[in-house]
Amino acid sequence: MNNVKVAVEKVVKSFGSLTAADNIDLDIMEGEFLTLLGASGCGKTTLMRMIAGFETVTSGRILIDGKDVTHLSPRDRNLGMVFQQYSLFPHMTIAENIGYGLRARRLPEAEIRNRVREMLELIQLPHLAESKPPQLSGGQQQRVALARALAGRPSVLMLDEPLGALDQKLREQLQEELRRIHRETGSTFLFVTHDQEEALSLSDRIAVMRGGKISQLASPEELYLRPANDYVADFIGQVTFIDGIWQRSTGHVTTAYGQRLKAEIELADGPVRLAVRPENVRLAEADAPNSVNGTLVEMVHQTGTTTYQVELPNGLMVKARQLGLREARLQPGTPIGLHFDTCKLAFAQI
Ligand SMILES: Nc1ncnc2c1ncn2[C@@H]1O[C@H](COP(=O)(O)OP(=O)(O)O)[C@@H](O)[C@H]1O
Ligand SMILES: [Mg+2]
């Protein structure tokens, strides 16, 4: 796992006056599942297309297995691609679709048959070998597209929002399937999504992108626990920002609404922006010692947890998450106390 599979070096892409990739450096390690995550328009597809060779670079270099491929055509880079649209050939059988690229490369017929069978087993659809794509569900078609992309044993499999057209339940199934296939093949996966939950559940590492730049590249845990900036903190998971003045000698931040919050942060004294996760805020009775008073605005029940939205007197909305169903006595409008855990996440105010 210590070899660099793909190296992106100082890559810039301009479309006229727009910079879609702004001096990007990125190493993708052999066998890893790396995700480009970011809002629509931040440059994910452009970066992937440059690695695949469908888009030229304005400047910079791209290496695959240590070899400079910057000016090679896509077919000389040996990469597999899967898109949101399944793009299978409707008149060909599933087996023919999976073997299509191998046939184009003129592999011996016996080897093609073997690989197609192997791929059908990998996606657990051997019984559909002779069906045609229109007879398959969306999820099945996307598994076939995956098999077709993997059949040529690509050095990297690239997936651009491949689950975007599927409903939530199916997405979750396919995510599990992708994790299994990644594990079983040991291939290098480069995945693109704008969905943070999807990125968190699939990836070894995530590159959070913003405006053509990589804002932070790290494991899901690292991004959540140690976001490099407030953008990442807000993008990965939920967060409430609370501005205040930090004083190391007292270990407290005095907030704009007057309350002092305990903190353990590595910043110089002065204005800071605390980032508070919902699981680090607990509900208390109104006027409880060391708590902040607010008014309950809304409760949202998710699987296994309830998120309470509480408005502080200065209008700031704070989210608090607790395990279990909501407590019946709590109604919107109820005065409530909030207890903040020692805050460990903060950024310098600019
Ligand atoms: N062929 C193109 N010509 C001009 N602008 C483009 C082209 N492709 C992408 N862009 C622009 O580059 C930016 C990044 O696009 P894209 O890589 O598709 O973002 P993402 O995949 O993250 O949604 C966007 O502002 C988009 O409009
Ligand atoms: Mg895109």
Image (spheres, rainbow, N blue to C red):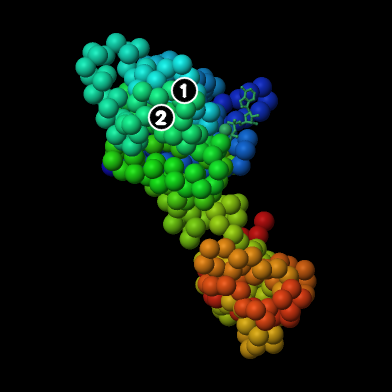
Marks 2 & 1, CB-CB < 8 Å contact: yes
Direction from residue 158 to residue 262 in the image, left or right = right
State the residue at coordinates (42%, 17%): 92
Above or below, comparing residue 234 to residue 322 in the picture: above
Q: Where is residue 104 in the image (x, y as percent from the top left)?
A: 35, 12
Tell me the quarter of the picture where residue 286 sits: bottom right
Above or below, comparing residue 298 to residue 154 in the picture: below
State the residue at coordinates (40%, 29%): 144
Above or below, comparing residue 133 to residue 44 in the picture: above
Can you tell me which quadrant of the image ligand 2 is in?
top right
In the image, is the residue at mark 1 within 8 Å of ligand 2 by its beta carbon?
A: no
Q: Three-letter amino acid code at disc 2?
A: Val
Q: How far apart are marks 2 and 1 (CA)?
A: 8 Å
Above or below, comparing residue 47 to residue 333 in the picture: above
Q: Mark 1 points at which residue?
A: 88
Label 2 element class: helix
Q: Name the residue under label 2.
A: 144
Q: Where is residue 81 in the image (x, y as percent from the top left)?
A: 44, 27
Residue 191 in sight from this viewpoint: yes
Q: Three-letter amino acid code at disc 1?
A: Leu
